[in-house]
C-alpha cells in the first residue's frame, strides 16, 4: 500500500468523522434555553443602564420599599423581555431526536404565545438533519422533506419536567411531567392519541385537575396500547 493511498484513507476518515460530529447534538432542556434568555435579559438591562451589574438595580429604577424595580423600571424590563422572546422564539428549538428506519423524529420546543409553551415533533430524512439547535419555521412550511407530525401546548399549569420522546415497538411516545401525552403509529404514519391543548380540555381545573384529565384521557390509553 503506497503512501498516497494511505493519505487518501486518512483524509476520508477524518472528513466522515468531522461530518458525524457536526451532525451530533446533545439533548437540550427547557432550562437550557431559558438560561440563555436570562443572560440576554441581564445584558440588555445593563446596556440600558437599568441595572448597574447583574445584582444591582440603578437608583433611578429602584423601588425604595420593595428594593425591586419601580414602575418605570418594570415597564422597561417588560419591553425588553417581550422583544427578546419575539426574537428568541422565532424558530423551533431542539430538545431530542430518535430514529426509525431512514428518518429522524425530532422534538422541538417553542412558545405558542407569550407564556404558552409548545412542543412539536418533526419528521425528516436522516440526511436532512444538520445538527443545529434551531429550525426555521418557514423551512417546515417550504421543505417537502420535512413534516410536522404533531404538536401540543400548555397554557396555565404546565408539564415541563422530564420531557422526552421514545420508541417502543413501532410506536412513538411523547412524555411530559411523567405522563404520556402523545402516541404516534410509526408503521402506519398516523397519530393515534394526542390533545393539542390539554389545559383547555381539562377546563383549567388547576395542575391537579389537569394531570388527572391527562392521566385518564391520554396516559392510561397510551399505556394500554403500547403494552398490548
Image (spheres, rainbow, N blue to C red):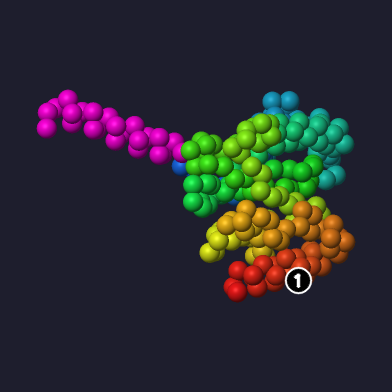
Mark 1 element type? helix
Which residue is label 1 attached to?
216
Pick the quarter of the image with the C terminus: bottom right
x%, y% of residue 118?
A: 72, 48
Instruction: Please name whichever residue, 69 or 142, is drawn nearer the observer in this view of the structure.
Output: 142
Left or right of 202? Residue 5 is left
Q: Which residues are magenta?
A: 1-23
Residue plotted at (79% across, 54% down): 197
Residue plotted at (84% across, 60% down): 201
Instruction: Please name whichever residue, 100 or 152, is drawn nearer the observer in this view of the structure.
Output: 100
Instruction: Please name whichever residue, 93 or 103, is drawn nearer the observer in this view of the structure.
Output: 103
x%, y% of residue 167?
A: 55, 60
Residue 33 located within the stretch drawn in magenta? no
Q: Is residue 163 visible?
A: no
Pick the quarter of the image with the N terminus: top left
Left or right of 10? Residue 73 is right
Q: Is residue 186 visible?
A: yes
Amino acid at each position: 500500500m503506497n503512501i498516497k493511498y494511505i493519505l487518501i484513507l486518512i483524509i476520508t476518515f477524518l472528513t466522515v468523522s468531522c461530518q458525524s460530529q457536526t451532525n451530533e447534538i446533545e439533548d437540550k432542556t427547557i432550562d437550557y434555553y431559558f438560561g440563555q434568555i436570562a443572560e440576554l435579559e441581564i445584558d440588555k438591562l445593563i446596556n440600558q443602564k437599568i441595572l448597574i451589574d447583574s445584582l444591582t438595580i440603578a437608583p433611578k429604577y429602584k423601588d425604595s420599599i420593595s428594593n425591586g424595580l419601580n414602575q418605570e423600571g418594570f415597564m422597561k424590563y417588560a419591553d425588553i423581555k417581550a422583544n427578546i422572546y419575539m426574537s428568541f422564539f422565532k424558530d423551533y428549538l431542539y430538545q431530542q431526536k430518535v430514529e426509525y428506519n431512514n428518518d429522524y423524529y425530532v422534538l422541538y420546543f417553542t412558545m405558542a404565545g407569550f407564556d404558552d409553551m409548545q412542543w412539536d415533533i418533526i419528521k425528516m430524512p436522516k440526511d436532512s438533519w444538520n445538527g443545529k439547535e434551531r429550525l426555521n419555521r418557514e423551512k417546515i412550511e417550504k421543505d417537502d422533506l420535512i413534516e410536522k407530525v404533531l404538536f401540543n401546548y400548555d397554557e396555565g399549569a404546565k408539564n415541563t419536567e422530564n420531557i422526552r420522546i421514545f420508541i417502543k415497538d413501532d410506536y412513538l411516545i411523547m412524555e411530559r411531567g411523567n405522563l404520556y401525552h402523545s402516541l404516534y403509529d410509526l408503521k402506519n404514519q398516523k397519530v393515534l392519541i394526542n390533545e393539542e391543548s390539554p389545559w383547555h380540555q381539562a377546563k383549567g381545573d388547576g395542575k391537579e385537575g389537569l394531570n388527572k384529565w391527562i392521566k385518564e384521557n391520554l396516559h392510561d390509553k397510551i399505556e394500554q396500547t403500547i403494552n398490548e
